[in-house]
Image (cartoon, rainbow, N blue to C red):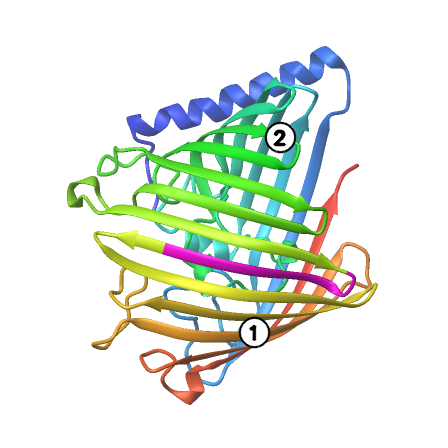
């Protein structure tokens, strides 16, 4: 079904047009080659031991089962000089179809669309649509340790729209956000109250980093007064054997909370092969974020193992097995607990 652009959405459309016009003027004036292009394709096949054709409702990436499909096709162009950065990314695939299902058609194809300006040597401001600052996993599989995402990543924003202020210090980056809600592009008259966010990154040592992300705002209509406070903390450790992550997510809404800790270890087997393992737990006793049938809330333990081969330039081939355990649906039955997935991704970036 096609969606018309509401008057309240026009400011976003005009922003994209003006940003593109501005970048083309800069390029013409400087006679340089600051334009870069990137293409990315993520193909996959996932199998389960039941007759379902899709994963449960709380998954948005690699969603189809028993059939080959495209998770993400991405075309991105960017303009970068000493002062300005402009980026526009267009996408299609299962991720765009399912994760942006609530957006109008003109917005559901936008991966990123932002303009950033340097105001001092260590300070920048940005406006538009940009990747989420919450979590360590993105919608681009080759940027993640495993082929598929964790439950926590699938149920936190993959993108935001709004404004960001960034200040870089010697061992710390500080970002502050004014946002159009919890993962939202188009303006919604029922969500008029802006949201606020912050992201603090500490590099304590070259091999050890800590990051804290915070969101304060409304994910439901303003009239419900369901204020959401969400925080994410992660630690990254780099060693000769590879890298490791420990993360902890905690959400509070209307006095009810949900949480999800996870551990990820990414082992380098040789220059062309990696083996990653993820252990996760998602606990939502009051069904604030994930609704399931049954008297109890969502309480699930997950384990995933993924092998990655990168022997061909610009390509990743992956095989992953995933297991979930729960006393409640959908993982209370043995045939629903296993997923076996394979993925092939290709990325090209212009120099």
Report the residue at 57% width, 49% height from top: 210
Report the residue at 39% width, 74% height from top: 300
* Most foreground residue, 300 or 10: 300
Quarter occupied by residue 88: top right
Nearest to the eye among marks 1 and 2: give it. 2
* Most foreground residue, 171 or 142: 171
Q: Name the residue under label 1.
A: 304
Q: Is residue 284 above or below residue 74?
A: below
Whether the magenta-drawn stretch holds residue 144 is answered as: no
Left or right for 271, reference 275 = right
Q: Mark 2 points at which residue?
A: 169
Left or right for 261, reference 317 = left
Quarter occupied by residue 44: bottom right
Q: Position of residue 341 (x, y in %)?
A: 59, 73
Q: Position of residue 13 (x, y in %)?
A: 43, 27
Q: What's drawn in magenta, residue-wise?
A: 240-250
Whole-angstrom CA distance, mark 1 to mark 2, is: 36 Å
Is residue 147 something one can see in this rendering?
no
Report the residue at 39% width, 44% height from top: 183
Callout 1 secondary element: strand
Which is nearer the N-term, disc 1 or disc 2? Answer: 2
């Amino acid at each position: 079904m096609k969606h018309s652009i509401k008057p309240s959405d026009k400011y976003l459309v005009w922003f994209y047009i003006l940003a593109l016009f501005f970048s083309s003027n800069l390029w013409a004036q400087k006679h340089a080659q600051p334009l870069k292009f990137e293409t990315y394709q993520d193909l996959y096949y996932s199998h389960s031991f039941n007759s379902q054709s899709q994963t449960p409702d709380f998954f948005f990436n690699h969603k189809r089962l028993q059939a080959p499909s495209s998770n993400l096709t991405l075309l991105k162009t960017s303009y970068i000089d000493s002062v300005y950065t402009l980026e526009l990314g267009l996408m299609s695939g299962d991720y765009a179809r399912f994760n942006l299902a609530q957006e109008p058609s003109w917005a559901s194809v936008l991966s990123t669309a932002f303009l950033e300006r340097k105001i001092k040597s260590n300070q920048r401001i940005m406006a538009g649509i940009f990747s989420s600052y919450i979590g360590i996993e993105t919608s681009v599989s080759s940027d993640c340790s495993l082929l598929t995402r964790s439950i926590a990543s699938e149920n936190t924003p993959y993108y935001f729209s709004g404004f960001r202020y960034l200040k870089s210090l010697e061992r710390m980056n500080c970002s502050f956000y004014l946002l159009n809600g919890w993962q939202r592009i188009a303006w919604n008259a029922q969500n008029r109250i802006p949201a606020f966010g912050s992201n603090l990154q500490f590099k304590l040592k070259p091999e050890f980093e800590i990051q804290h992300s915070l969101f304060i705002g409304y994910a439901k209509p303003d009239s419900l007064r369901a204020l959401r406070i969400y925080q994410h903390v992660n630690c990254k450790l780099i060693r000769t054997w590879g890298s490791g992550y420990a993360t902890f997510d905690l959400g509070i809404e209307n006095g009810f909370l949900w949480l999800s800790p996870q551990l990820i270890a990414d082992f380098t087997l040789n220059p062309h092969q990696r083996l990653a393992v993820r252990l996760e737990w998602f606990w939502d006793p009051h069904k604030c974020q994930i609704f399931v049938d049954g008297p109890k809330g969502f309480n699930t333990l997950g384990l995933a193992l993924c092998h990655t081969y990168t022997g061909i330039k610009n390509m990743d081939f992956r095989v992953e097995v995933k297991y979930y355990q729960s006393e409640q649906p959908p993982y209370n039955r043995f045939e629903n607990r296993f997923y076996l997935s394979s993925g092939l991704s290709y990325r090209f970036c212009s120099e």
